[in-house]
Image: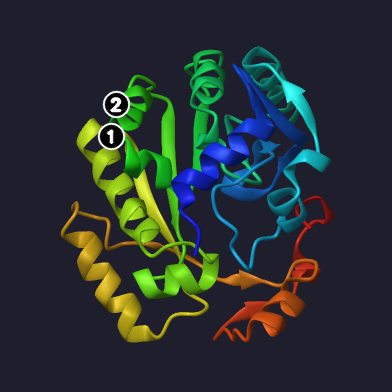
Amino acid sequence: MYDPVKRAEDVARIVARGELRKYYRFRPARFYGGIATADCVGCSLRCIFCWSWRQVVTPGAFGRFYSPEEVAGRLQGIARKKGFDRVRMSGNEPTISREHLLGVLEHISPDILFILETNGVLIGYDETYALDLARFKNLYVRVSLKGTTEEEFSRLTGAQAGGFTLQLKALENLYRAGVQVQPAVMVSFSPAHNVRALRKRLGQIAPGFENIEIEELVLYGNVEERLRRAGLKCDTAHEPADIPPEQV
């Protein structure tokens, strides 16, 4: 079991240089009704079901470094070309390089919605991170919970169970800071009673958090083989045949 905060620090030494951060692609995507996407390199977790597994486990082998201005420029260029009004950072974990993320946000036009997809671990670890993010009124944060309990979190990520507590703390920190935030939950490995218990737990953090966004497993790449080797079975999974190629 690894410490996800310590892992974030270790990975940051590979994928971040001051305000620079590694990315491996920029693309339009169909999610959120159409969105410009920057896929970063490097994550604080090693989720067994991750669709960008190669970038997670070997971050030094992918991408190149970009400045915040370059990332914002590429995102807004895609958005203008496609007629989108929203952009996001995705792929791995955007919060690993705090200086870079805040720099990107500073260069995004206020009339464009920035969607931050994060596991929330670092925001839960340091509440001042949420306060920094609260400066940006065009920011929406989607915290992706890895399972519904501490035990499920460890089984799915290989990380210490306290990482799940930090995910919940991130939701609390962001809500208290006035950031637009909503939880999403990977439930494909979770029994129904655990999902119900999590809804209640989230509702105690903030009104509306019990209305979670449900994430279900999609069998990208070699995900199925990784699950088999780990001895994990899921209740629901989808083949990626109906997913556009740029998502695989």
* Mark 2 surroundings: few (<14), some (14-19) or many (≥20) residues within 10 A: some
Q: How many marks?
A: 2
Image location (x, y in percent) of residue 235: 54, 86
Which disc number belongs to residue 173? Answer: none
Indicate the quadrant containing the C terminus: top left, top right, bottom left or bottom right.
bottom right
Residue shown at 44% from the left, 68% from the top: 153
Out of 2 and 210, give the one closest to the viewer: 2
Amino acid, disc 1 = Glu
Q: Which residue is mark 2?
A: 131
Out of 32 and 24, give the one closest to the viewer: 24
Position of residue 32 relative to residue 194, above or below, is: above
Quick check: 203 left or right of 25? left
Disc 1 versus disc 2: distance between alpha carbons?
7 Å
Residue shown at 77% from the left, 67% from the top: 242
The quadrant holding residue 234 is bottom right
Per the image, label 1 sits on a secondary structure element best described as helix
- Label 1–label 2 contact, CB within 8 A: yes
